[in-house]
Amino acid sequence: MLPNRSKMAETKQQLEPLRVALISGITGQDGSYLTEFLLAKGYEVHGIIRRSSNFNTQRLEHLYIDPHNSSAPLTLRLLEAVRNHIETTGRKVKYYQAGSSEMYGATPPPQDETTIFHPRSPYAVSKVVAHWYTVNYREAYGLFACNGILFNHESRRRENSVTRKITRAVGRIKIGLQKKLFLGNLQASRDWGFAGDYVEAMWLMLQQDKPDDYVVATEDSHTVEEFLEAAFGYVGLNWKDYVAIDPREALGWKPKVDFKQLVPMMVKSNLERAKREKVLADKGFLDAHQQP
């Protein structure tokens, strides 16, 4: 009698330990792609989201938003929670920290895992702090903790990026809902990849024998202008007919006073003020040698 294959598969599934994943920022671009990826591999997935709140700002006097609060403190709390959970239960837990190429900041390319960070924004600074928290917990407590230093990765699920601004405008211009797209520096170069591919790299980091830090990039950089050419070209349009670079065209603004007018204007003002000060000094109301 042949064994029942469905029962064998069911028994095997029961013997295999359930793999559980906890994702911070599960509703974001990376979180949603990672959720789909892990569910397809049989994981039980849980997520952490930030609950939106309605604030009464009628009597608001001061509003302070700490830009460092986006990453570092949460990372520290999660790492400590993982450490305590392992010590308490003895279970094996692996931790992935999402870093960013923004941490390199002013550091010139090429950049890899050994490149020194030089962050140039509060966001980048907080990511660097989170990175070193992860490294320290790995080295001090033996945690399986990895940093993924991800370069720009895009998708149809990301809203706030220059690439999304471009593709959204292309769609609206093609349909006739928009006439112009206003942008800044078109020569800015970025390494753009697909977010759906990058989440696989996140998972692979946690499948290695030893924890480490990894840079994830396509190693293929393109300028904003190249992105424009590809995006508009896809719908049969020439981007040069629709993209405006000079912000003065968008605002209807232009300077009325040039450099040669500005300097005499300022000197003339102070010359008139000095004359008034001299009159007061001559009458003894002002110390002529006192610097204003």
Image (spheres, rainbow, N blue to C red):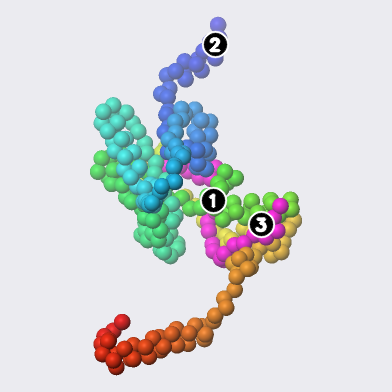
Q: Answer with left or right where residue 147 lies relative to residue 247.
A: left
Q: Which mark, by number, is residue 230?
A: 3
Can the viewer see residue 46 in this picture? yes
Q: Label 2 belongs to which residue? A: 4
Mark 1 surroundings: few (<14), some (14-19) or many (≥20) residues within 10 A: few
Q: Position of residue 140 (x, y in %)?
A: 25, 43
Q: Answer with left or right where residue 172 lies relative to residue 224.
A: right
- The correct choice, above or below, for 256 with respect to 36 in the image is below
> What whole-number distance in Å separates the C-alpha atoms at marks 2 and 3?
55 Å
Q: Is residue 196 magenta?
A: yes
| Residue occupying image coordinates x 50% and y 35% | 35
> What whole-number distance in Å separates the C-alpha atoms at marks 3 and 1?
20 Å
Q: Position of residue 123 (x, y in %)?
A: 41, 53
The amino acid marked with disc number 3 is Ala
3 or 1: mark nearer the eye: 1
Q: Answer with left or right where residue 75 lies relative to residue 218.
A: left
The amino acid marked with disc number 2 is Asn
Q: Label 1 belongs to which residue? A: 160
* SS of the residue under disc 2: loop
Q: Position of residue 284 (x, y in %)?
A: 26, 90
- Tell me where the magenta segment starts and ends, as one range: 177-205
2 or 1: mark nearer the eye: 1
